[in-house]
Image (tube, rainbow, N blue to C red):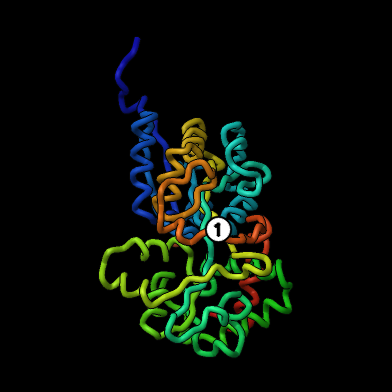
Amino acid sequence: MFSFSSNAQEKVLNLYSARHYQTDEALYANFTKTTGIKINRIELGDEPLLERLRAEGNKSPADVILLVDAARLWKAQAEGLFLPVQSKILTDRIPAELRASDNSWFGFSSRARVIVYNKATVKPEDADTYEELADPKNKAKVCTRSGSHPYNLSLFGGMLERVGEAKTEAWLKGLVENQARSPKGGDTDQIRAVASGECGIALTNSYYWVRLLKSSKPEDREVVAKVGLIMPNQNSYGTHMNLSGGAVARYAPNREAAVQFLEYLASDEAQGYFANGNNEWPVIKAAAQRNPELESLGNFKQDRLSAAVIGSRSAQAQKLLDKVGFK
Ligand code: FE
C-alpha cells in the first residue's frame, strides 16, 4: 500500500560541498523537488572537507563530494576516497578529458585562470602570457593570492608540465621578485587591488571577473572600468583551465541517490544552474544559457592538460614554492 514517507523511509542525500556559491541553492532545491530526495549539506573548503572524509573513514555519512579544483579531485581519487560509478548517462554526456579514467569523479563546470591588468599603468602586450608575469619589466606589479592555494598550485602544476622544472622554478622566482605585495586575500581582492593601482597585474579565476562585470554596485562598476582582462598564452599552449567536479564517496550509505544526483548535475537544466549560476562554462555545450557577460569573454584557446596530469604535479609545485619563498 502506498504511504506518505515517514522519517525512516525518507530518502536523503548527504552532500559534502566545497563550492561556495549562493546560486547553487536553486540547484539543490530543484533536485529535491524532482526526486523527493532531501539534501543534507555540509560546506567546507576543499582541504578541510577531505580531512573530514579521511577522519570519518568507513563511518562517513558522506554520499556526494563536490570539489572546486582538478588537483584536489585527482588527489582524493588517488587516496581512494571516491567510488567509481557505472552510469551511461554520465559517460555519454561528460567528455572523457573532463572525468577520471576510472569514472570515480566527473567535471561539471570549467573556469579559466586569467590575467587582469590596470589599463592606466600596464600595456596588455606586456602581460599576455603567464611567463611574462615573471619578466623584470613587470617588477613590483604582480599580485596573487597565496601560491599554495589550489587555484595557483594547479596553474603551477600545469606550468611544470609545459616548460619543465628548471624553467618553472626560475619563473616562480621571478614572480616573487615582481610581487607588488605579499600574497593575501582571494581572487576578487586582487582584482580590486589592480583597480586601485596597488597592483598592476593579477591572476584570477574567470568567474570572479564575470561576477564584477554583472554587478550594478557603483564601486564594482568603477573596478570594471579600470581593469582589463587577458586570456593568457593564446599563441602558445593556451589558457590554464580548472574544473569543479563531483564524486560518490567511497563509503556512501545512499549510493543510488548519490549517482542520481551526479546524473542530475549532468542534465541540461542543472548545468544551467551549476555552471552559469556561478558564471562558469558548462561541460555540456548544449546547456549554455544566455549569459552575455560570460559570453563577452569570447572563444579562446584552452590548455587541454588533463586534471590527472595537473594533479600529479602539485606536490612538486609546492616544493618549488617553498624553495623560492613564494608564500
Ligand atoms: Fe572560487
Where residue 213 sits: x, y (%)? 37, 64
Circle count = 1
Q: Is residue 173 above or below residue 57?
A: below
Outermost residue on the top side: it is: 1
Residue that mark 1 sits on: 299
Q: Is residue 126 above or below residue 93?
A: below
Q: Quadrant of ligand 1?
A: bottom left
Callout 1 environment at 10 Å: few (<14), some (14 to 19), or many (20+)? few
Does the closest atom of ligand 1 sit within 8 Å of the Cβ of label 1?
no
Of 111 and 105, nearer the camera is 111
Under circle 1, the secondary element is loop
Of 34 and 280, nearer the camera is 280
Q: Is residue 179 above or below residue 149?
A: below
Where residue 214 sits: x, y (%)? 34, 61
Where residue 93 sits: x, y (%)? 58, 38
Of 103 and 217, nearer the camera is 217
- Indicate left or right for 293 with 100 as reference: left
Residue 55 seen by the camera: no
Residue at image location 49% in from the left, 86% down from the top: 141
Q: Quadrant of residue 133?
A: bottom right
Residue at image location 35% in from the left, 50% down from the top: 23
Outermost residue on the left side: it is: 218
Residue at image location 54% in from the left, 71% down from the top: 148
Q: Quadrant of residue 307?
A: bottom right
Where residue 45 sits: x, y (%)? 44, 59
Q: Is residue 326 above or below residue 104?
A: below
Quadrant where the N terminus is found in the figure:
top left
> Which kind of residue does numbered mark 1 sit on?
Asn
Residue at image location 55% in from the left, 48% down from the top: 107
Residue 122 seen by the camera: yes
